[in-house]
C-alpha cells in the first residue's frame, strides 16, 4: 500500500483534561456537550448536569431554538459557582438565513444576548449555503430560498467579529473537502475548526486528514452515527449495533458508544456526544481510561460505508414548499 498523509492527533490522550490546541493557540476541550435535539424545559437542566459532570466545552446553535434557556442555565451556573465563564469553551453557529454581510454581526449579537454572554470562544458557519434572511428571531426553516451572498463574503464578516472581540475563533461546519480548501486559500484569519458528520460508518479520511494537516480541528457532531433516534426515524443502520463494535466493547468492558467515541479520539477528532441523561453524560466522558489496539482500529476502519446519513441536521427538507426545492425530498446542497 502506498503511503499517504495521516497527521498524528493534536492532543495528548494521557492527560487528565486533554485539549486541542487551535491554530490561534487557544485550548479546546476534546469532549464537548451537544445541545441539538433538546426539548424546551429539558436543555437548561441538562446543561447544568453536564457542567456538574465536568463538561467544559458546550456546542450551541441559534437554529436549535434553545439559546435563551441555555443562557438562563449558564447564568445559574455562574451565580452558584458551578463554573466560571473563563473555564468554559462555548461554540455558537451562524445560521443559513443570516449569511448576509450586514446580518452576520447582528446574528452573533442576537445569540450572545440570548445566552447572556459577551463573546464566543468559537463561532461557526453552520452550513455552506446562504438563504434569504428571515429575521434574527426566526431562523429560516421551510420553503427556504437561496440567497446571493458568496460564502467568502460571509467569512470576511466573520473575520471582522474576531477583530472586534465578539469571537475568539471562527470556523465552519459541514464543509466538504474542496470548499474547505477553497476557503483556506482565501482567508485572512485561519479557520480553526470544521464540524462535520463523521463516525464509524462515514469515516471521511481524506477530509479529516486534510483538515488536520492544516491544523484545522475536526469535530464530530454525530460521533455515534445519529444513534437510535436516526435508526427509528429514517430506518438507517447505526454503528452502535454493529457486531464488530459490540465485540470490541465486550472485550474492554465498555459500552458500544464508548468504543465509538474513543475510536474518533484516537484518530485525532474532537467529539460531540449529546444526552440529557446524567448517567449517559458520565459514560460519554469515561473514555480516557482505555485505548483501542491497532488491530481494533483497523477493524473499525473496515466499517466505512462511504455514505452520509444526513444527520444533525441536513437542510434537505427545508427547501420543501419553496421555489428552490429541486427534488421530491427538497434540495441536497451536497449534490
Image (spheres, rainbow, N blue to C red):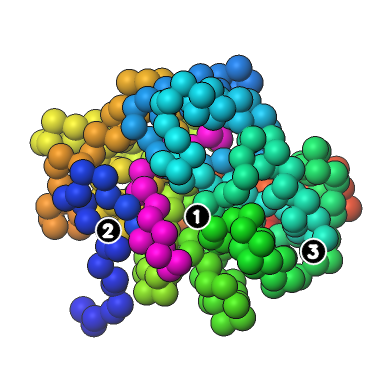
Per the rendering, the mark at residue 11 is 2
Instruction: Give the CA distance from mark 1 to mark 3.
Output: 22 Å
Which one is in front in this view, the residue at disc 1 or the one at disc 3?
3
User: What range is drawn magenta here?
Assistant: 21-36
Please tell me whether the stretch drawn in magenta is mainly helix, strand or loop: loop
Per the rendering, the mark at residue 99 is none
* Residue at the image point whose x is 53% and y is 60% from the top: 169
Instruction: Give the CA distance from mark 3 to mark 2.
Output: 35 Å
Residue 143 sits in quarter: top right
Q: Earlier in the sequence, mark 3 or mark 2?
A: 2
* Residue at the image point whose x is 36% and y is 48% from the top: 29
Write down the residue under mark 3: 101
In the image, farthest residue toward the right: 323
Residue 207 sits in quarter: bottom left
* Local secondary structure at mark 1: strand
Confirm whether the magenta stretch covers residue 130: no
* Residue at the image point whose x is 69% and y is 70% from the top: 156
- In the displayed structure, 197 sits above or below 45; it is below
Confirm whether the magenta stretch covers residue 33: yes
Which one is in front in this view, the residue at disc 1 or the one at disc 2?
2
Write down the residue under mark 1: 195
Amino acid at each position: 500500500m502506498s503511503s499517504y498523509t495521516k497527521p498524528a492527533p493534536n492532543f495528548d490522550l494521557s492527560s487528565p483534561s486533554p485539549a486541542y490546541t487551535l491554530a490561534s493557540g487557544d485550548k479546546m476541550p476534546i469532549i464537548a456537550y451537544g445541545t441539538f435535539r433538546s426539548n424546551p424545559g429539558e436543555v437548561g437542566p441538562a446543561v447544568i448536569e453536564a457542567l456538574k459532570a465536568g463538561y467544559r466545552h458546550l456546542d450551541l446553535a441559534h437554529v436549535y431554538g434553545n439559546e435563551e434557556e441555555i443562557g438562563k442555565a449558564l447564568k445559574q451556573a455562574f451565580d452558584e459557582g458551578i463554573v466560571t465563564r473563563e473555564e468554559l469553551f462555548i461554540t455558537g453557529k451562524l445560521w443559513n438565513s443570516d449569511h448576509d454581510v450586514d446580518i452576520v454581526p447582528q446574528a452573533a449579537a442576537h445569540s450572545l444576548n440570548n445566552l447572556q454572554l459577551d463573546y464566543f470562544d468559537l463561532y461557526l458557519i453552520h452550513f455552506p449555503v446562504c438563504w434569504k434572511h428571515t429575521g434574527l428571531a426566526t431562523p429560516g426553516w421551510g420553503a427556504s430560498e437561496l440567497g446571493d451572498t458568496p460564502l467568502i463574503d460571509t467569512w470576511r464578516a466573520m473575520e471582522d467579529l474576531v477583530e472586534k472581540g465578539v469571537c475568539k475563533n471562527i470556523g465552519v461546519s459541514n464543509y466538504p473537502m474542496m470548499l474547505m480548501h477553497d476557503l483556506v486559500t482565501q482567508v485572512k484569519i485561519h479557520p480553526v475548526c470544521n464540524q462535520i458528520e463523521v463516525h464509524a460508518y462515514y469515516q471521511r479520511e481524506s477530509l479529516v486528514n486534510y483538515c488536520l494537516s492544516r491544523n484545522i480541528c475536526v469535530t464530530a457532531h454525530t460521533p455515534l452515527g445519529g444513534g437510535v433516534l436516526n435508526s427509528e426515524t429514517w430506518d438507517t443502520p447505526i454503528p452502535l449495533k454493529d457486531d464488530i463494535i459490540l465485540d470490541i466493547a465486550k472485550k474492554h468492558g465498555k459500552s458500544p458508544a464508548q468504543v465509538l467515541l474513543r475510536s474518533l479520539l484516537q484518530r485525532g477528532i474532537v467529539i460531540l456526544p449529546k444526552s440529557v441523561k446524567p448517567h449517559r453524560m458520565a459514560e460519554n466522558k469515561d473514555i480516557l481510561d482505555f485505548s483501542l489496539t491497532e488491530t481494533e482500529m483497523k477493524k473499525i476502519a473496515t466499517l466505512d460505508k462511504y455514505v452520509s446519513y444526513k444527520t444533525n441536521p441536513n437542510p434537505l427538507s427545508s427547501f420543501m414548499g419553496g421555489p428552490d426545492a429541486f427534488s421530491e425530498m427538497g434540495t441536497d446542497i451536497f449534490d
